[in-house]
Image (spheres, rainbow, N blue to C red):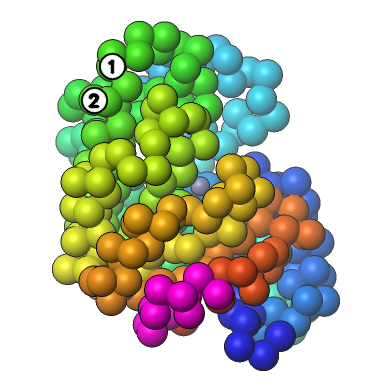
Amino acid sequence: MLNIQSFSYHTHTNFSDGRNSLEDMVQRAKQIGFTEMGVSDHLIVHKNMKQDVSWPLLKDVNARHVYNDDFKSILEKYKRHCDEIRRVSKQENFKLYVGFEVDYFPYDGWEEELKWFISQLDIDYLHTGNHFFCEEGFEHIINMTFFKQVCPDTSRYAEYVRRHFETMKRAVESKLFKFLAHIDYVRRYGDDVCGVDEYMLEKIQVLDALQKNDVALEISTKGLRKIGDFYPSAPILQAAAKRNLTVVISDDAHKPEELGMDFDKAEDIIKKYGFNKRLKF
Ligand SMILES: [Zn+2]
Ligand SMILES: [Zn+2]
C-alpha cells in the first residue's frame, strides 16, 4: 500500500444513500489498511425540493430521505449522525472525520441557512458535489438522474449545463468547502448533455476558482465504475495540472467494497500529470 493514498474523505453510509452501516464501512477501511476516513453523507436541502418536476419520480427510489426542503426539521437527525460517527470512531479506535457532501444552491438566503445549520453541528469539513440542474435564479431545480425524462427539449440542455458549472464555481468561491467532488459527473448522463471536450470555458472557470480559493479538486475513481473514466476527464486534469491545483483521491464509496477501489490507477494519474499537492487533514 506504500505510495497509495490510504484514506478517503468522500464516503457514504446508509444515513444517506450508502448501502451499509458506518460500522461496516469502518471494518472494511481497517481491513484494506486505511489510516483514517472521512464520512461525508449527503446534505441536500432546497426550499422547493418537492416542487422539482422530477420529485414524483423519486418515490420509487429508496433514497428519498436524502432530499430535504428545510434545514431546521433535519437538524436533530444530523446531530445524532455526527454523534454516531464520533462514537464509532472511539469504539473502533479509528480516526473518522465528520463531513458532508453538500449540493450548493445559490438562491437568496440559502447560504445563510447552511451556515446556521453547520454552526449547530460538530463537524470537521464539508465538500461540495452537485447533483441538480437549476432553473434561472436557482429557485427551482431538477434532479439530474431524471433530467432527460422531465426535460425532453434538448435545445435547453446547454443552459442547464452552463448553470451547473456556474453553481460549482460559486460553491468554490463560498470557501465553505475543502474540495470539489466529481467536477464533470454530468458526463454520466450522456454526450448529448455534456461531452468530454465541451463546456471547457465553464470548466476552466471552475478550475480558476479552485486555484484562487485554494480548494482541492477531487480525482474520483467512481467515474471508472460508472462511465469507465475518471472524474475529471483528461482535458480537465491537464488544465488542473497547469494550475498546480491541490488534489485528493476519492472512491465516493457507497458500499464497503468500493473503499479504496482503483486508488492505484488514480495514483498513476497523479504521477502522469505531475500533481504535487494533495489534500490531507
Ligand atoms: Zn456526489
Ligand atoms: Zn458522494
The magenta span reads 268-278
Q: Residues within 10 Å of mark 1 (few under 14, many from 20)?
A: few
Extreme-bottom residue of the structure: 2
Rendered image quadrant of residue 6: bottom right
Which residue carries the number 1 mark? 156
Examine the rendered structure and indicate whether residue 96 appears above or below residue 84: below
Relative to 266, 212 lies left or right: left
Look at the image and say whether residue 274 sits in the magenta stretch.
Answer: yes
What residue is at 28 percent from the left and 76 percent from the top? 244
Give how far across and how far down residue 9 sits, in percent.
Answer: 54, 68
What residue is at 55 percent from the left and 51 percent from the top? 229
| SS at badge 2 | helix
What residue is at 22 percent from the left and 54 percent from the top? 204
Nearer the observer, 191 or 83? 191
Q: Are marks 1 and 2 in contact (CB under 8 Å)?
A: yes
What amino acid does circle 1 point to?
Arg
Nearer the observer, 231 or 212? 231
Nearer the observer, 60 or 67? 60
Asked whether the viewer can see residue 126, the reply is: no
Relative to 190, 81 lies left or right: right
Q: Quadrant of the N terminus?
A: bottom right
Q: Residues within 10 Å of mark 2 (few under 14, many from 20)?
A: few
Asked whether the viewer can see residue 165, the reply is: yes
Distance from disc 1 to disc 2, alpha carbons, whole Å, reads 6 Å
Rendered image quadrant of residue 79: bottom right
Rendered image quadrant of residue 261: bottom right
Which residue carries the number 2 mark? 159
| SS at badge 1 | helix
Give how far across and how far down residue 251 sits, in percent.
Answer: 61, 61
